[in-house]
Image: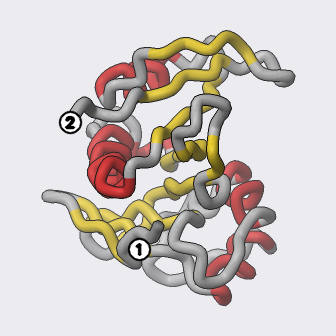
Amino acid sequence: MTLPEVVVTERLRLPLWSPDEAADILDGRHRPGWHRDYPRQDDRDAATMYRAGDPWGPRHVVRGTTALGSIGFFGPPEEAADGVPETEVGYGLVDEAHGWGFATEALRALLVETDREGVRIRASVEPANAASIRVLAKCGFTELRGSNEDGHLVMARPLPAG
């Protein structure tokens, strides 16, 4: 199972991080072409899970020539209890990029790729994060699995029939 190195939408590019970029993000260093508020703490957290060459790893969310945040999976899919391959997605944008539909657009684009691979996706979200819950709902995350050890809601998106 593999995903493209760069996923492209109408308004966005979602390239995988390079090893050098991941190191800069982990250390909180800023690069030209990155929004002044990127990387965020969540991006630095994602960088702790970075594995070079992993198509299921973190990606930049790029609008035009500016990286506005990140999206990616917490590692390659693993077989769930029902036998379906599954992995978790995480995403986040700088505050200035909120409200433009970029998170929904980026997540939908990655879901097209995961559907091709037959991989079910889940997400954990803070119950008070109404904007992220709306993104997940718009992207078809309808299965509520309760909460995880951090008190976050765990939601999953069933694979499309067919």
Whether residue 10 is situated above or below residue 30 in the rendered picture:
above
Instruction: Using residue 76 as the reference point, say whether residue 113 is left or right of it.
Output: left
Circle 2 Cα neighbour tier, 10 Å, few/some/many (<14 / 14–19 / ≥20): few
- For this rendering, which residue is in front, 82 or 58? 82
Quickly name the residue at label 2: 162
Circle 1 Cα neighbour tier, 10 Å, few/some/many (<14 / 14–19 / ≥20): many
- Which kind of residue does numbered mark 2 sit on? Gly
Residue 41: % across, % down: 73, 52
- Proximity of marks 2 and 1: CB atoms separated by less than 8 Å: no
- For this rendering, which residue is in front, 124 or 76? 76
Residue 53: % across, % down: 59, 83
The residue depicted at 49 percent of the width and 42 percent of the height is 95
Mark number, residue 15: 1
Q: Quadrant of residue 140?
A: top left
The residue depicted at 80 percent of the width and 73 percent of the height is 27
| Residue sitting at the far left | 10
Instruction: Indicate the secondary structure of the residue bearing disc 2.
Output: loop
Q: Quadrant of residue 113?
A: bottom left
Residue 33: % across, % down: 43, 78
Residue 26: % across, % down: 77, 70
The colour mode here is: secondary structure
* N-terminal label among 2 and 1: 1
Whether residue 51 is situated above or below residue 137 in the rendered picture:
below
The residue depicted at 42 percent of the width and 28 percent of the height is 157
The residue depicted at 41 percent of the width and 74 percent of the height is 15
Measure the C-alpha gap from mark 2 to mark 1.
29 Å
- For this rendering, which residue is in front, 81 or 37? 81
- Which kind of residue does numbered mark 1 sit on? Pro
From the image, state whether disc 2 or disc 1 is nearer to you: 2
Whether residue 73 is situated above or below residue 125 in the rendered picture:
below
